[in-house]
Amino acid sequence: MKSLFFIFALFFAANLWPAVSEELFEDRAKCVVYIKYAINFEEEKRMCHINGTLVNDDGLIVVSAGDIPMIQLDMLSDFKVYVKGGDINGYPADYLGAESFSNAHFLKLRKPFPEGLKPLSKFPRADFKVSDKVWGIKIMCEDNEAYYPIYLENYISFAEKRYDGKISSVDCAPMKFGNTQDSVTALGAPVFNSDGAVVGFGWGETHLGYSLFSPKGDRIQVILKDDGYSAQILSIEDLNDILANIPKTPEGDKHGWAGFIGLKPIERGVAEFVGLPPDKCAFVVSEVIEGSPVQKAGIKSGDIILGCDGENFPRFRSSSALMDFFSRKMERSNPGDKFKFRVARGGEAPKELDVSMVARPKILREAEHSYFKRLGFSIREFLLDDAINRRIFDGKTDGAVVQYVKDNSPASSALPNRLVPGYILREINGVPVKNYAEAVDTLKKFNDDTSMKELVILAEDFSQTKVVRIKLD
């Protein structure tokens, strides 16, 4: 009798949430599109297939951060949008760039638009909470001709609160995310509630953890990725915030930059020691870039940043959330903006230091690059990010970095060490590489002069200097 009652209760509970009608599903699926684009690796081209969301009547499409790499713009091409029942050759779109903080990408569909689309702006908005049943959409492709939506659903198993400055930050995050137990929508596609109101956007790819056991009982942890599907939902409020920061150029806006490197939130006990309330936090400065705004202001490695512009930093549940909060504040600034940081050093009394932001340094998306077909590799400019990754903080960016090495090329077959992407060029045939332009000129001579049969490069990875001897035909 108890078993029968239990089964009845489960059946009753499962039917409390009304099924989404076919009409509602078909209507909401009109805002999700299938996208193809090409990544051009010198002599190779790779086609990529993703989903995106049509946002408004102007043809704006938003794509999740991880679906388009942050590489040079001339390596991205052939953006086309495909819809159910539309032209099998697709509809051309232009790449607009990525938002500086989230790295969400934007496309603009060219006119005339395909029929049957309905932008996200036409649908009502709502919030979500734990235990809500939500659903989403993924556009599938069959034989590169047929495009059709599939339905996904799940429950919200975890939901953060969005910090608005009015409530305690300890149980909040700078952005509101929710998680479902399994995939609920496509990466880059919306999520809806039972009424058809949009509550969020598929943000993070689904990762599923499993344990494998050998016959001897050994346990191996395995993480599987559900390609193109998402179990992490970004709230619609945060998506609207991202949509308000579309870059003015595809290269990205030159937002403000201070020069902090490796900021680390301090422990709760240290925060109390320096006089901060329990719900506030501070940063320890690991490094500063020489010549940067913070270095010119007098901030040094080991200093504690207690606050900014008269306010303390909120303490969030995780240190990564605090870093997101601070990074967004910095990356939403403009060159010329001024911040007043309250800084503690050793046993000295805290002092206020003024920092004037400058334009961010050049990023990979803007780096010049050159390919040498006979040699079988390309190089690009050495960037500040390359220096930071190697814990070089002198602010210098002179040099050249290997960007691409073609398979079965002279560079990939070099002895005693083959050339590898990411290596820094230090010498070419005994001549030091002073900057990118000189490296291009030298390599171009070897590439064009067929009488030259050998090239010796001194290259550096993250820990060693290696000799690369390239034999040329």
Image: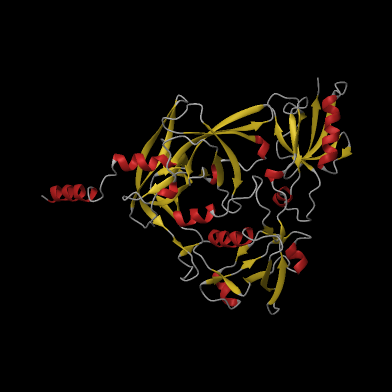
- Residue 264 vs residue 231: left or right? right
Q: What residue lies at 59% left-to-right and 67% top-to-bottom?
A: 266
Q: In which quarter of the image is the C terminus?
A: top right
Residue 102, placed above or below residue 222: below
Identity of the residue furthest to the left in this view? 1
Q: What residue lies at 67% left-to-right and 71% top-to-bottom?
A: 341
Identity of the residue furthest to the bottom in this view? 349
Query: Along the line of sight, which residue is nearer the eye, 340 or 347?
Result: 340
Residue 188, placed above or below residue 101: above
Query: Along the line of sight, which residue is nearer the eye, 47 or 178?
Result: 47
Q: What residue lies at 62% left-to-right and 66% top-to-bottom?
A: 283
Q: What residue lies at 64% left-to-right and 31% top-to-bottom?
A: 40
Q: Where is residue 197 in the image (x, y as percent from the top left)?
A: 36, 51
Q: Where is residue 282 in the image (x, y as percent from the top left)?
A: 60, 69
Q: Is residue 418 visible?
A: no
Q: Can residue 12 be seen in this view?
A: yes
Q: Place residue 455 in its image quadrant.
A: top right
